[in-house]
Amino acid sequence: MLSTTEGYMTPDGRQIGGVVMEMKNITLKFGGVTAIEDISFDIHEGEIRAIIGPNGAGKSSMLNVISGFYVPQQGEVFFRGTKRAQLKPFEVARQGIARTFQNIALFEGMSVLDNVMTGRLTHMKAGIISQSLWRGPAEREETENREICERVIDFLEIQSIRKTPVSRLPYGLKKRVELARALASEPKLLLLDEPMAGMNVEEKEDMSRFILDVNDEFGTTIALIEHDMGVVMDLSDRVVVMDYGKKIGDGTPSEVRNNQAVIDAYLGVSHD
Amino acid sequence: MAQSNKGTNNLVSLPALLRRNANTFGSSAAFREKEFGIWQTWSWAKALDEAENFALGLIELGIQPGDFVAVLGRNRPDLYISMIAIQMTGATPVPQYQDSVADEMEYVLAHCGAKFVVAGDQEQVDKILEIQSKLPDFEQMIYLDGRGLRKYDHSKLHSFLSVMESGKNSGQNSRSILKDREGALTYDSTCVMLYTSGTTGRPKGVVLSNANIIETAKTTCEFDNLTQSDEILAYLPMAWIGDFIFSVGQAMWSGFCVNCPESADTLSTDLREIGPTYYFAPPRVFEMQLTNVMIRMEDSGRFKKWLFDYFMEHARQVGANILDGKSVGLGSRIKYFLGELAVYGPLKNTLGLSKVRVGYTAGEAIGPEIFDFYRSLGINLKQLYGQTEASVYITQQPDGEVRGDTVGVPTPGVEVRIGDNGEVYYRSPGTFVEYYKNPESTADTKDPEGWVATGDAGFFEEDTGHLRIIDRAKDVAKMSDGSMFAPKYVENKLKFYPNILEAVVFGAGKERCVAFVNIDLSAVGNWAERNNIAYSSYQELAGNTKVLEMVKEHIEEVNISISEDKMLAGCQVHRFIVLHKELDADDGELTRTRKVRRKIIGEKFKDLVTALYDGSGSVYTETEVTYEDGRKGKISANLDIVDAQVINQANIAAE
């Protein structure tokens, strides 16, 4: 039933494929707190899908459900047409899903290159012994994976900090390194949790450019959470709006912009 | 004069030199570029192969002899190879400054009527697409890096690889066309056209022939013993004659390897990894390097700082003498050797200059402290004087005769004479053919006998025969009391302070001199950090009273040194302003090679100049700025005007 959903054409002429991931009636509770209540939406192949909403709306929880980190009490997640069972993080990664974090989660003491290389871990098959001996297949494997990482480094223009320890980098670059690590795993679906939080205008423009380029160049499907409305409206093909754990809007940026419920949630309503 | 009609062994064009190199040392490295973290190598054989394929591909696209092809992008082997390929087809490459904005490029491309463009990446492609409606001759564009270009209309756009591929698969017909056209190249055919940066007015297209480039490369390679085993780092703009001579002319002639950095940001790492033996940098680069070294030494531990100061003091005394082969006592030599182990060696290694055998600086005057610093480390840094119209070389310093204040003796084959007004004239095998489509300027600059006016005022030192340049001939003016006004002389003295990035002195026709100053953000920023001065922007730092105080001290020191020279004592700076913005080529205040355009600055900041002369204590100003993407904005500021102490000479009446 899911594969029958047609793709669509974006206004700028990109062909979007069928549904890759569908959330059906998701409800997530932490004890007595309902973080997400009965939300359904889907993500098409090749699109940039944004999740927006005021603070505490449940956006990050939603992203964690997509990534399989949280297991919802009710509802089902379909990935590529099949219902997804509960997965361990590495199994999620193997499925082709990668993410970045709202609060940067890099290995601070390691170099940028090493951090990016960790994105290739699930693709490495050599055992611990052959890796430590550094012979034959292990060496070949590392060379291959290094090349993929170098392409990502080139793509994101971080050659000059390749050997720099992450702890010495400014915030904006750390975010870019996180994106590099996620890209190194060659994901089908990329989840970005507030990729532009705390950046200045120039850094935001750079990051927007990179997100569009990733989507364009590798055809990666992207789901992102973002606060900056300008960025969201410019970047995304379709937007889900959440407020207090509920979905209050879903559609193209212009549809969402004119949705009264969304306007109320953002601007507030008078209670008289 | 060596007006030879054919070169040695029929080596009459750069493609011919490329073929010779591929035959003689085919497997050794012609180009290297760091990509994906690894140095990729092009052998001479591979370079020839690519050049041939690309030339065939261009023929398939319909290139004709006499066409002009713009080449724009950062230094990359593919772009160098494409220039040779363009020559193979009988067309002329016109390299462009990659940071030019679209408007500037429009003039140049329309002027030469470029039919094809070879662009480095999306940024460059976008610029051409923006102006293509105003370029009636433009036909096809070829790009190297296809990133972001997937969705572009590819009817006029081709990837470099696809053009090479089509060339490789081309039939006998195209191949025989290529053979004929390459065979038709002579010593007098056009090799390249380069646009001068244009300190005044519109850029002019300087046409240089194969003879110009090859003869110059030949004599200068002999002068400095450049051989096939040398290494060079190509990082200066490809549109600049210097890069064309070093990375194409001399590289093709002697067959040394041209290394291209991975990106502008990785330059210092790449320099260290390559360790060039032949190195060129404008004074600005040496200045920046030295500033960085000094900043890092300030931040280092006490022992390291002491060690550095101790041995640098020794190097200043004997280093340059040892380099020049003069007699130096054994004790000093041993101490210098220890210094080499402890300080000079590691420092040169960090700078990437360990292996430099021949280093040059030119373009602007270099500060004596900076020059001496590098020479005292044992780096054979020399000065040369030249211009685009001369295929670079007019004078240069031979080994062992290097001094900070001269530009050397005439390069072999170059005749130099000083005109009645003090202007320097030269005549050489490298002298340009003409300015493209501009016979009046050609006639103004080059007389029928081939003498070219440099526009610089200078004189030969009687005892050494070295040339000294004072200033641009037209900038040397009179002040209202008739004394000589040489602004550049004063500006250079000011710029030798690490804290001062740029200075502009006014005073022609006036009774006193005033100055604009740009502070160097990295040096002054570091100083501010150490002195607990908080600032949030360039503008704020530039307006800080302590910074003004510091600049005032520098200016007063300069005034003292100027006052010692009787002829120029009138050029002392009486009042100055520290500008609220950095002078920038994007705003037209500097040329693309970063020389100040005094006249334009004077007009643009007219209000400030007036305020400097009318005695007011501060002035409010608004300035239009252009951002890198071409948008415009405004910044406003209240600037303090500061008086500086001048030294009263007997002939200057009491103030």
Image: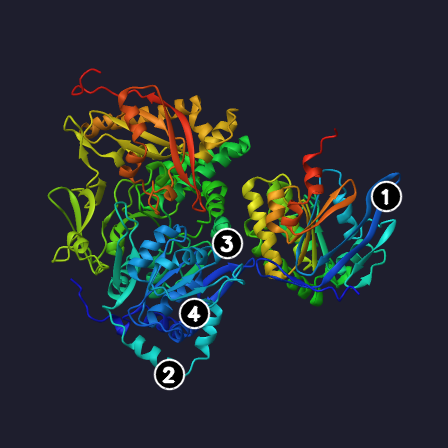
Q: Pointer 4 indicates a residue of which chain?
A: B
**Is A73 positioned to the left or the right of B289 in the image?**
right
Tell me, yes or no, whether dots 1 and 2 are on the same chain. Answer: no
**Helix, strand or loop at mark 2:** helix
Q: CA distance from mark 4 to mark 3?
A: 23 Å
Which one is earlier in the sequence, the residue at label 2 or at label 4? 4
Q: Nearer the viewer, mark 2 or mark 4?
A: 2
Give me the residue at 38% from left, 39% from top: B373
- Position of residue B417 measured from the top left corner of the image (x, y, whole percent): 14, 49
Q: Residues within 10 Å of mark 4 (few under 14, many from 20)?
A: many
Q: Mark 4 — residue? A: B47
**Helix, strand or loop at mark 3:** helix
Q: Are marks 2 and 4 in contact (CB under 8 Å)?
A: no
Q: Residues within 10 Å of mark 2 (few under 14, many from 20)?
A: few
Quadrant where the N terminus of chain B sits is bottom left
Q: Mark 1 — residue? A: A29
